[in-house]
Image (cartoon, rainbow, N blue to C red):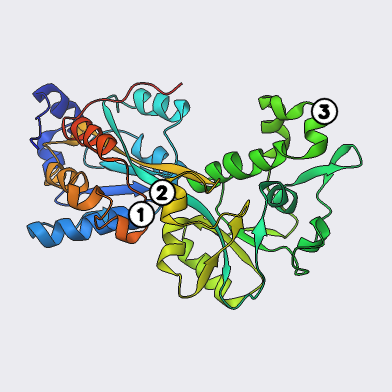
Amino acid sequence: MSFVKLTVSALALGALSATAAAARDEIRIVGSSTVFPYTQAVAEQFANNTGAPSPIVESTGTGGGMKIFCGGIGEGHPDITGASRAMKKSEYELCQSNGVTDISEAMIGFDGLSIAVSRSNEADWDLSLEQVFLALAAEVPVDGAMVPNPNKKWSDIDASLPGSEILAYGPPPTSGTRDAFVELAMHAGCKHNAWVQEQGFDKDKKWVKENCSRMRQDGPFVEAGENDNLIVQRLEADADAVGIFGYSFLYENLDKLKGIKINGVAPSTDTIADKSYPVSRPLFFYVKNAHRGVIANLDAFIEEYMSDDALEADGYLAERGLVALSDERRVELQDAVLNGTAMTAPN
């Protein structure tokens, strides 16, 4: 598959000075902790295949990565950012205001937002989205009103659940995983609540966003930073704690952890692919097109990321837990990204 070179004017924009940009020998990548292991795998494969310096990949979180990525063009700014959600309109506008006006969007595959526990936890966990909301939301419905969450133990929510204290380690607000979890689990669980439905609030997007988005700050929910490996370590240390992170981290630690079923469905590559697992999302990376052809080896790295070896259902990213796109969607993605097709403004 050929790579179409961008115009000289775009390249000039992208570096502030082509000479200055060329002085940076290593590709620089920031962004999502969930996308990080996939990008790191591509970086290692690229370095092994070409002998070129391995790209510098930093796990800054999706929101943090977008802020850094959209800071400007030139060698002082990163070339790519990973994201566990699509770029927001406000982020796109920030990019535009700082001269980052030509960006390619790559949706590389799908991931499940896993809730997991240590394998030493003997409970047969199966949570509904409503139970997740009632455990972790800052306010929940009680006796016809939204009040500070009174639930201390899982069994306070439902007697069939474990009697252990609620303790969940999860992502911070800067993380795309947090954004996705709030939308796919908290909002959805809130809308399943009987009182919320009786009031008709489940159909009021503004009410749901304002009342069902905040996570607890009284102890049961702990922001664990952008390093998901730290959550894995904490679950190993406390068998009663649960962790929230992308499926790839569960996949890589199945010898230590087990996934919690949501609505009777356990997270797996199959259940994420067929959408039967209810908490799944697409994963992305974004390329600063003005840096193509200017930053050394960037074009070749993008070609490796877009290769069949990386992205097919039996590719090396699938081996690390990425749920692959269909063949048709993968070909469309490869054509758009390799040819530097610019994304349009988000709604």
Instruction: Give the label on residue 199, or none.
Output: 3
Q: What amino acid is labelled 2 in the image?
A: Ser
**319 sits to left or right of 62:** left
**C-alpha gap between disc 3 and disc 1:** 42 Å
Mark 2, secondary structure of its residue = loop
Mark 3, secondary structure of its residue = loop
**261 sits to left or right of 210:** left
Earlier in the chain: of badge 2 and badge 3, it is 2
Q: Is residue 225 visible?
A: no
Front residue of 325 and 167: 325
- Label 2 environment density (alpha carbons within 10 Å; few <14, some 14–19, many ≥20): many
Front residue of 20 and 67: 67
**C-alpha gap between disc 2 and disc 1:** 6 Å
Q: What amino acid is labelled 3 in the image?
A: Gln
**C-alpha gap between disc 2 and disc 3:** 37 Å
Disc 2 and disc 3 in contact, CB within 8 angstroms: no
Residue wearing tag 2: 32
**89 sits to left or right of 47:** right
Instruction: Give the label on residue 36, or none.
Output: 1
